Image (spheres, rainbow, N blue to C red):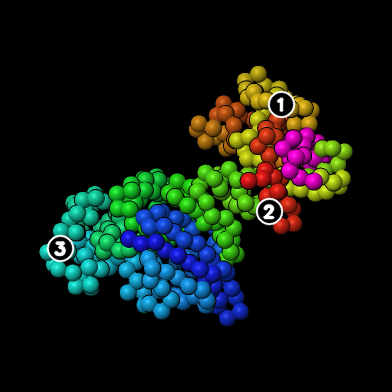
Amino acid sequence: MAKVQLEEIRRRFNNVSAIEDITFEIPDGEFWVLVGPSGCGKSTILRTIAGLESATSGNLYIGDRLMNNVPARQRDIAMVFQNYALYPHMTVAQNIAFGMKMRKVDPKLIQERVVKVARSLSLEHLLDRKPKQLSGGQQQRVALGRAIAREPQVFLLDEPLSNLDAQLRDDTRAELKQLHHQLGITTIYVTHDQVEAMTLADKIVVLERGKIQQIGDPQGIYARPANRMVATFLGNPPMNILPAIYQNNVFDVNGQSLSVPPMVREQVQLRQGQTFDLGIRPEHIYIDEPPSRPRAAMPVRAVERQEKDNNQLLVEVQVVEPLGRETLIRASLPGLTSVLNIQTNANVRPRPGDRLSLQLDLSQLFVFDPKTGDRISPLD
């Protein structure tokens, strides 16, 4: 096991920059997740750590050893790919043992590790089968077993769950977390799935266009996103962004007024006509009685209301998605193309075309610079 340290790593392909100034240090034994949209550079970082790509500039350390010119086979890392890369002509036992065999580990020790790893992954009854006789989840566990059996310093996982169905992905994610707790091996995991990132990681590295946007623990990033990109990427459903103009002491959202929370007044120098992007998460929006068609069955969730008349937005329902324990409503604001996501009680079932009156918990309001996307309130 070892720490992993990247210092100003860059990777360019001709004149195209894949990653820029990537700098972070993963302490020994921690589970870090690289997350971001497709093309953000997360797999390039992983391949650079593995030695499958060469950095254009910068330094990479595993433990205290500089790895810039060390071949991949000598870096003592194990990598699990999206497609698992199992040998189809080998049994499960042979696949798990393959890496150790190539390293000329004692055959008796190989057998002991294969049995131990198979037991930890519930593969004992499958050791004589070949990959084509396994389900996707079983193949994924075999690939993990092959990596674990090597007892490497570092695990690198490149979207290993993306080919699994939803239920199996949830189950395997829990197994991964339990395995890491047992083994304590430094792990770097790449995904575009923010749910995987939030549930697995000790720390998350959020990337966009080859640059780090924010590093932190999952709950810290969720509660204090550094910018608009992070705010809208982490969270399901994502944070709502409302373009607004400050005028006449309120935020004007295309003709509808929202009060300026006291904290925002303290932290932001507000000027008449200044534009902002306001962010609020779906769970901080509550439904009042629909103004166009009141329903006695539609509950109103009580919230503390400051200046009620300026905490409301009128919207029109576009889509209703019942999700069992809750309902997700997608609504439009008059004159705006953006969709407003509302997460509410499972008993709330408006119909498309209904007009709703919404109450916003403005104590949970975020303010972003519309040009840079940086968060300007609340301050850290």
Residue 151 picture quarter: bottom left
Question: Upstream in the sequence, badge 2 or badge 3?
Answer: 3
**Residue 140 seen in this snapshot:** no
Q: Position of residue 341 (x, y in %)?
A: 64, 40
Instruction: Assess disc 2: are there few (<14), some (14-19) or many (≥20) residues with their C-alpha within 10 Å of its C-alpha.
Output: some
Magenta region: 251-269
User: To which residue does mark 3 refer?
Assistant: 109
Q: Nearer the viewer, residue 287 or 150?
A: 150
Question: Upstream in the sequence, badge 1 or badge 2?
Answer: 1
Q: Left or right of 358: which side holds 320?
A: left
Cα separation between marks 1 and 2? 28 Å
Cα separation between marks 1 and 3? 67 Å
**Residue 109 seen in this snapshot:** yes
Q: Nearer the viewer, residue 241 or 126?
A: 241
Residue 72 picture quarter: bottom left
177 to 95, vertically: above or below: above
199 to 9, vertically: above or below: above
Type of the residue with mark 1: Arg
Cα separation between marks 2 and 3? 54 Å
User: To which residue does mark 2 refer?
Assistant: 374
Q: Position of residue 302 (x, y in %)?
A: 64, 23
Type of the residue with mark 2: Asp
Instruction: Assess disc 1: are there few (<14), some (14-19) or many (≥20) residues with their C-alpha within 10 Å of its C-alpha.
Output: some
Q: Left or right of 55: which side holds 69?
A: left
| Residue at (42, 69) in percent of width and height | 61
User: To which residue does mark 1 refer?
Assistant: 305
Type of the residue with mark 3: Leu
